[in-house]
Image (tube, coloured by chain):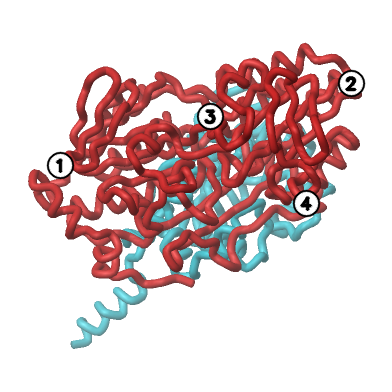
Chain colours: A red, B cyan
């Protein structure tokens, strides 16, 4: 259902009056606002890009600790040897060229009252609007016996980069007939189809190099996203190579024994040649430090604008935010970035804020020429972000080869375009 | 009075200019993550929609919405978009500048592709493949990967959905796989 949003509704929803009142230095309509963005992943980078596109006069500072960003989307293909990490690695030169003040530094504190961001490098950045896009952090404390030290023996590879390469090396060193365990964590987590796509990409590698090997998924959840599509593809491409144990059948990890290198579930102790332990997750550390999170470990927001319900004037986008039906994906973060930019540009130029548009497109590639997808469209409803009924949905099950190949190709093209949108 | 009536009628015929409505721009911006900023695709199989003619864009989006035209995912998006919004989105992207794909020319393939264009495509798509009106989309400068995926619909035996165009079906079903790739390449290298 489409709703008509008039300006008054938007201003009410935005709390615009209080926003403007909060900026004595901000002349209404001058577009000379200062926006600081914390985090240069898909959400933060795209917010910076669109601010410069629609309001070149706004002063934009992008704070990102790393000089390069490595895309998680499609990084499971690195494990199968289908692509290298370079194809997923991007810098921030294009942002600098467009006039974004790119600062590679670690944010250590956010003062929501004085509207200042402090960094490890000892700098202070004053802002009129703050966009916080810190991604995820791992919540090892949620599982008995787990701790960050276990990354030495049980990789997560859930932030693409060095661990992705290490995991690939482990696969290469493993014997034919070996076993890999992948854990799928407590919901919500970054990239819901990720563990199952990863299982498929590992099986793709095994099929050609170590055909007696297997992948076991120990799942906290009772269902998986795109379930019928995954199950169909595993059967077609990798029969007998992937086993999935849902939470209600004993897949939940109850305890970790790091010394013995075992995972304890209702089925007893589990171990494998390779354990790819994907930990439970919560909002990125800076969101915790800044007090933007609630008991869930994620950042509650106003679904009309992505503004924090804890600290006014701070917008939280991407994986770190509580977004209800919206999955934690790059595409979703991109659409949230545009919602925030539209709100900031409208308010600073004295124009009405457009109706927020929240979308998600997520392609999964399970092997060469074999892809499928989910589409979601979301709207604010009763204080939450809710899937619009009658739109979005999954690729068909039982689709012919042409369709699977086209979806894989469009998946690569999606990557090409969204990384260009974010970084090039 | 007559003049005034005429002016009003003309204004109505031209349609309300929704294309600059911030609500339409906000929807259009959600297209960019796949189709590129302002609808200019960075590749490889994703079509550029900036500068494509309005009638074509509107017709295709409406057909996709109604499930009358096969698409991998566009139908799932269009179900949320009203017919009026589709018209405005078509107008919005049609008004953007056409930016040709960047494709390095491979001479043998390009020459073969030129022959295929002359023999098979130019009656409808123009001598240079740049006709862009009515139900004919501009092909010159479109990404070859996209053109190939589209023309393969007419020859891939596993593609069983209704073909988008009967005329296209007649024309391309006899082309070899090489000819499909060659004409897509040639068109992609045009400006």
Q: Is residue B19 left or right of residue A362?
A: left
Pointer 3 local density, CA inside 10 Å: few below 14, some 14–19, many at least 20: many
Report the residue marked by disc 4.
A228
Report the residue marked by disc 2.
A177
Dot 2: element: loop
For discs 2 and 1, the disc positioned in front in the rendered view: 2
Q: Is residue A424 above or below residue B46?
A: above
Q: Mark 2 and 4 residues: CB-CB less than 8 Å, in contact?
A: no
Pointer 4 local density, CA inside 10 Å: few below 14, some 14–19, many at least 20: some
Dot 1: element: loop
Residue A174 % position (x, y): 80, 15
In this view of the protein, can residue B165 be seen by the observer? yes
Q: Earlier in the sequence, mark 2 or mark 4?
A: 2
In this view of the protein, can residue B156 be seen by the observer? no
Q: Is residue A244 left or right of residue B33?
A: right
Q: CA distance from mark 3 to mark 4?
A: 26 Å
Q: Are marks 1 and 3 on the same chain?
A: yes
- Which residue is pictured at 57% across the width and 65% down the height? B79
Q: Are marks 4 and 1 on the same chain?
A: yes
Q: Is residue B90 above or below residue B43?
A: below
Q: Chain of mark 4?
A: A
Q: Chain of mark 3?
A: A
Q: Are marks 2 and 4 on the same chain?
A: yes
Report the residue marked by disc 3.
A71
Report the residue marked by disc 1.
A32
Pointer 2 local density, CA inside 10 Å: few below 14, some 14–19, many at least 20: few
Query: Residue B175 or B30: which is nearer the viewer?
Result: B30
State the quadrant of the C terminus of chain A: top left
């Amino acid at each position: 259902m489409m709703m008509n949003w008039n300006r008054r509704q938007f201003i009410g929803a935005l709390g615009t009056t209080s926003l403007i009142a909060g900026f004595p230095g901000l002349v209404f309509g001058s577009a000379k606002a200062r926006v600081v963005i914390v985090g240069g992943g898909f959400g933060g980078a795209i917010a910076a890009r669109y601010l410069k596109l629609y309001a070149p006069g706004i002063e934009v500072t992008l704070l990102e600790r790393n000089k390069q960003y490595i895309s998680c989307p499609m990084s499971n293909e690195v494990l199968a040897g289908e692509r290298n990490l370079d194809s997923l690695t991007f810098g921030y030169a294009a942002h600098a060229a467009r006039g974004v003040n790119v600062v590679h530094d670690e944010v250590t504190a956010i003062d929501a009252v004085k509207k200042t961001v402090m960094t490890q490098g000892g700098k202070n950045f004053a802002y009129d609007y703050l966009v916080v896009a810190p991604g995820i952090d791992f919540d090892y404390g949620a599982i008995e016996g787990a701790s960050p030290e276990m990354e030495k023996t049980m990789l997560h590879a859930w932030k693409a980069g060095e661990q992705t390469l290490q995991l690939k090396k482990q696969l290469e060193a493993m014997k034919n007939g070996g076993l890999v365990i992948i854990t799928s964590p407590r919901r919500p987590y970054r990239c819901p189809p990720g563990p199952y796509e990863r299982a498929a990409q590992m099986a793709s590698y095994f099929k050609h190099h170590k055909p007696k090997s297997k992948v076991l998924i120990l799942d906290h959840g009772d269902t998986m996203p795109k379930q019928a599509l995954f199950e169909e593809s595993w059967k077609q491409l990798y029969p007998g190579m992937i086993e999935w144990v849902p939470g209600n059948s004993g897949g939940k990890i109850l305890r970790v024994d790091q010394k013995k290198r075992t995972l304890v579930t209702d089925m007893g102790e589990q171990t494998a040649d390779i354990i790819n332990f994907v930990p439970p997750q919560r909002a990125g550390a800076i969101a915790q430090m800044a007090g933007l999170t609630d008991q869930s470990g994620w950042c509650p927001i106003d679904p009309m604008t992505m503004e924090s319900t804890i600290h006014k004037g701070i917008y939280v986008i991407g994986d770190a935010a509580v977004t209800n039906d919206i999955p934690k994906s790059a595409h979703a973060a991109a659409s949230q970035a545009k919602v925030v930019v539209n709100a900031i540009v409208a308010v600073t130029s004295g124009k009405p804020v457009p109706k927020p548009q929240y979308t998600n497109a997520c392609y999964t590639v399970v092997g060469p020429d074999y892809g499928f997808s989910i589409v979601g469209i979301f709207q604010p409803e009763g204080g939450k972000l809710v899937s619009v009924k009658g739109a979005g949905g999954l690729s068909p099950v039982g689709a012919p080869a042409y369709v699977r190949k086209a979806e894989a190709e469009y998946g690569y093209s999606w990557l090409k375009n969204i990384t260009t949108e974010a970084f090039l | 009075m007559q003049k005034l009536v005429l002016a009003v009628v003309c204004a109505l015929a031209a349609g309300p200019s929704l294309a600059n409505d911030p609500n339409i721009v906000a929807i259009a911006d959600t297209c960019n993550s796949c189709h590129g900023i302002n609808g200019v695709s960075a590749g490889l199989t994703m079509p550029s929609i900036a500068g494509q003619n309005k009638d074509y864009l509107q017709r295709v989006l409406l057909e996709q919405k109604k499930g009358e035209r096969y698409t991998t995912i566009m139908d799932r998006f269009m179900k949320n978009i009203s017919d009026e919004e589709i018209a405005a989105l078509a107008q919005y992207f049609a008004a953007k500048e056409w930016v040709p794909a960047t494709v390095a020319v491979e001479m043998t393939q390009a020459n073969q592709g030129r022959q295929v264009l002359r023999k098979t495509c130019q009656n409808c798509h123009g001598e240079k493949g740049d006709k862009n009106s009515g139900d004919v989309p501009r092909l010159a400068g479109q990404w070859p990967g996209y053109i190939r995926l589209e023309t393969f619909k007419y020859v891939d035996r596993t593609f069983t959905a209704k073909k988008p165009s009967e005329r296209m079906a007649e024309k391309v079903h006899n082309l070899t796989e090489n000819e499909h790739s060659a004409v897509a390449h040639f068109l992609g290298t045009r400006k």
